[in-house]
Image (cartoon, rainbow, N blue to C red):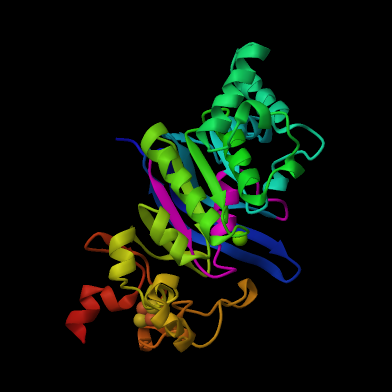
Amino acid sequence: TEPVLSVRNLRVAFAGRRGTLTAIDDVSFDIARGEILGVVGESGAGKSVTGSAVIGLIDPPGGIVGGQILLKGERIDTLSPDAMRRIRGRRIGMIFQDPLTSLNPLYRVGRQIVETVRTHTDLSEKAARQRAIDLLAEVGIPAPERRIDGYPHEFSGGMRQRVVIALALAAEPELIIADEPTTALDVSVQAQIIALLKRLGTERGTSVMLVTHDMGVIAEAADRVAVMYSGRIAEIGPVRDVVQNPLHPYAKGLMGAIPTLAQETDRLAQIPGSMPRLSNIPQGCAFHPRCPSAFARCLVERPDPIPVGAHRVACHLYDRSEASAA
Ligand code: SF4
Ligand code: MG
């Protein structure tokens, strides 16, 4: 069946003083109905920019300069700002790290949900209020018929993030972009929010693009994972495969940073250096200065993703012609 979201050869660039900086370079992935795709990488890898591109929120001087973004087979990257605004909220929901970016502190939370419900449906005020109570109950807010009249500051951080999820669900979107939704929360609350996101997929069929730097969150929540490095996907595949058997040298380093494998957390530290700046992306494979397996070809030729079992890996080590030549 047709994917809910299809990103094809996406390129995003920012006009800078010294020329154009490419932030996303030829990124492709699909998200199926009810699926959680984790997008992981260090800061600067391009995860959030990819999410912003999908929801049409890349601010000038940045912009999409290549590729396509399709929602249920229809291009959305070419829509007008007005048409895109209607898609956001209605067909694509958003959850950010700080719930207060989505909630107006001056309004009772129920008011905000009721307004969203009424914008996207023809329910009466009374029916919309009942829908809001049901949504708050669904996301695990206790005593929702009372809490609906509370203000955002009257909720704890975890409860506030649940309210944001209820708000995102109010329009029954097909896709939710969640950017570091659990990063500001305690570990126990994180687990509850992850469980809630997973339930959206199984019970509502909502697809989620989950952007995070936290490989532990990905391992818990995602069905598939895309590991990003320097504006490209280094490896993508089913989460179990990629976590247990990462193929790309960068993904191997990243998997060592999963908290549940605490005894191996220094593995990432064995990869010296840091993510390159956009203005200074190395030739060839952008990871080559940090890669313990780099060889001559890596310095001059950029690897494109190639299928390896259930994974797609952008690394010359997995090029069969390379293997036979070696
Ligand atoms: Fe390392 Fe080369 Fe693979 Fe890049 S292409 S990850 S430098 S081995
Ligand atoms: Mg980010």
For the question of whether residue 306 can be seen, the reply is no
**Residue 272's spot in the image, x, y percent?**
50, 88
The number of discs equals: 0
Relative side of 301 to 308, left or right: right
Near-viewer residue (68 or 181): 181
Q: Which residues are magenta?
A: 34-61
Tell me if residue 47 is in the magenta stretch. Answer: yes
Q: Quadrant of the N terminus?
A: top left
Q: In this image, 309 relative to 207: left or right?
A: left
Q: In percent of the image, x 29 and y 69: which residue is there?
A: 244
User: Residue 234's x, y, as percent?
Assistant: 41, 68
- Which residue lies most toward the left here? 324
Ligand 1 quarter of the rendering: bottom left
Residue 288 position in % (x across, y down): 45, 83
Q: Residue at x 29, y 78 (%)?
A: 317
In the rendered image, the residue lying farthest to the right is 106
Query: What residue is shown at x 72% (from left), y 40% (from top)?
Result: 103
Magenta run includes residue 203: no
- Residue 26 drawn above or below residue 266: above
Residue at 76% over, 44% down: 153
- Residue 242 position, x and y percent, is 32, 65
Camera-side residue: 172 or 138?
138
Question: Which quadrant is the C terminus positioned in?
Answer: bottom left
Q: In this view of the protein, can residue 172 be seen by the observer? A: yes
